[in-house]
Image (spheres, rainbow, N blue to C red):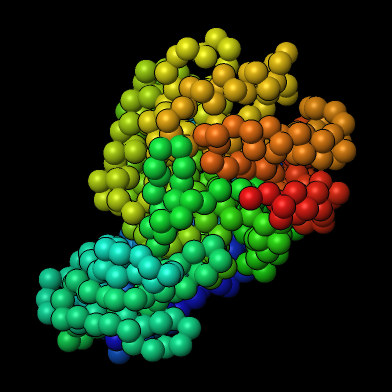
Amino acid sequence: MRSDITLNRWNFTLGNYKTKVTIPHTWNVDDEVMRHKGKALYETTVFINEEYKGKKVYLKFNAVYHTANVYVNDILIGGHSRSGYTPFRLDITSAVNFGAENRIRVETDNTKAETMLPHNGDFDWADDGGIIRRVTLQIREPDGIEYMHITEHIDSISGGLASGGFSIRTNIDKPCKVKVYDYMTGEKVCESDGLTVQFNNLKLWSCYSPNLYLVTLETDNDIFEERTGIRRIETKGEKVFLNGEEIYLKGCEWMPGSHPDFGMAEPLDHSIKCLKQLKAAGCVFTRFHWQQDDSIFDWCDENGLLVQEEIPYWGYPKEATPLQLDIAKQQADEMMHFHFNHPSIVCWGVGNELGAEKEATIDYVKDMVSYFKSYDKRRLVNYVSNTLSRIENIDKDDGTLYGDIAMWNDYLGLWEPSGDIPSHMKRTCKKAEGMPLLVSEFGLCEPHFKGGDEERSRILKERLAMYAEIPNICGYMWFSLNDYRTHCGEEGEDKMRCRVHGSTDLFGNEKPSYRLLCELQKSNR
């Protein structure tokens, strides 16, 4: 028996302020308490049937920012810390009263903290507190299937079809059967007694043909299913290949959680509006500075948008200590455990804009690249640098050179002064000679820099022409799709505090530079 109950109605208490809320929720867009940084309380009740006695009962949280302590019937059953955007699941069986109402209390805290990533206040997006994503009560068999990680091994590719095999990692050690179905038609395409499956002529997943399969794992008393796609992402020399064909990673980054009415509890329909804007602009690739919900990756799976999902290690400390490494590995484990089967996630990211010329940071990048690949060899692993182009570092090593793709944030002439941008850019790209180089950010942030959307459009047009002339640039990432809410923004106050960096506004309304992005990307490669 397998049952999932969504828990979306909760009572919320913050000091003397009490109200009923719907999860996902953040208090930092509520006029009464939006300035609060600290602790808050969520409470609900759920009836758990007597028939579930003898089963395992779990609470699955898709994200709580950033620390949670969870009580069931006044018993502390566990918590989650050091990561505000990754899912976690707690076994609450020992505290459950079967055949009765059960009280659930979640104490949350979004106080700035050095013992987490993002570190302290060193990040460039909103620090919205709360149960910011879905909560599910899960009923499972005591010896049931808890997860299924599917790895495809492609032997040959021909005409958009692949032959090879699946291997499956799971928690069970008992006889089982695997069946694979075409997700759209429901047709069974292969099966096996055991955790390996051979296949012939299955359709590949790509940006333009996002074919998906449903894989089921069955035992004598349980059945578990996951959706996946078959694809191969790899680098060769200075190029990136998807399913054996070179792909130019043209893209744009979207900063979720920016609608002032919702914050980090943004509803899926608004997120889909933003994702559709990326696809309509001709994007094949995007990156997320912090981990996102499964529902976002589900959409990317279904619509063929490639993604880099990143550990939110941004800015400081410049030299990673053993603490940052340990937290990063915790988050990597959670990312791979919960997001492993999404074909849209083609890259893991280990950090952004650290002191990448420093030996300790280079060691951190090497360690994290190795750590991801020790479990997941079907994805690329990268680090995003803002130091690659610095004049004082031009002859120094840089952490981004130890990923699969060198990733460089290009703000020449803006955050990074430059008297001769074309020459400076060529010198920078030469540092990554022999490997693919992706411009992982470029754009205009106002009011720090002047000129408005007209200047933003000029930069967009100028830079794309420059990138096209440099052989080892394998793509670019326009930053950003939208103006975005951030606790360190230069414009607005409270829930409207933001950085005006986007080609759409906080509400998703399009500016002229968005229309130019659409025009240029459709004619580019």
The spot of residue 494 in percent (x, y) is 75, 43
Seen at 29% across and 41% down, the residue is: 371
Residue 71, x across and y down, in percent? 40, 61
For residue 217, above or below residue 34: below
- For residue 84, side relative to residue 450 (left or right): left
Which of the pair 422/150 is nearer the observer? Answer: 422
**Residue 244 location (% of width, % of height):** 41, 56
Question: Residue at coordinates 22% horizontally, 74% vertically from top-left?
Answer: 197
Q: Is residue 403 left or right of residue 38?
A: left
Image position, residue 318 (x, y; %): 47, 22
Residue 510 seen anywhere in this rendered image of the structure: yes
* Front residue of this view, candidates 387 and 199: 199
Nearer to us in this view, 521 or 342: 521
- Going 30% across and 70% down the picture, which residue do you hit? 163
Name of the residue lying farthest toward the left: 174
In this view, 362 is above or below 95: above
- In this view, the residue farthest toward the front is 159
Q: Is residue 31 visible?
A: no
Where 248 falls versus 488 (above or below)?
below
Which part of the image, by quadrant, shows the N terminus?
bottom left
Camera-side residue: 408 or 368?
408
Q: Residue at x 57, y 52 (%)?
A: 285
Left or right of 305? Residue 89 is left
Count the labels in the image: 0
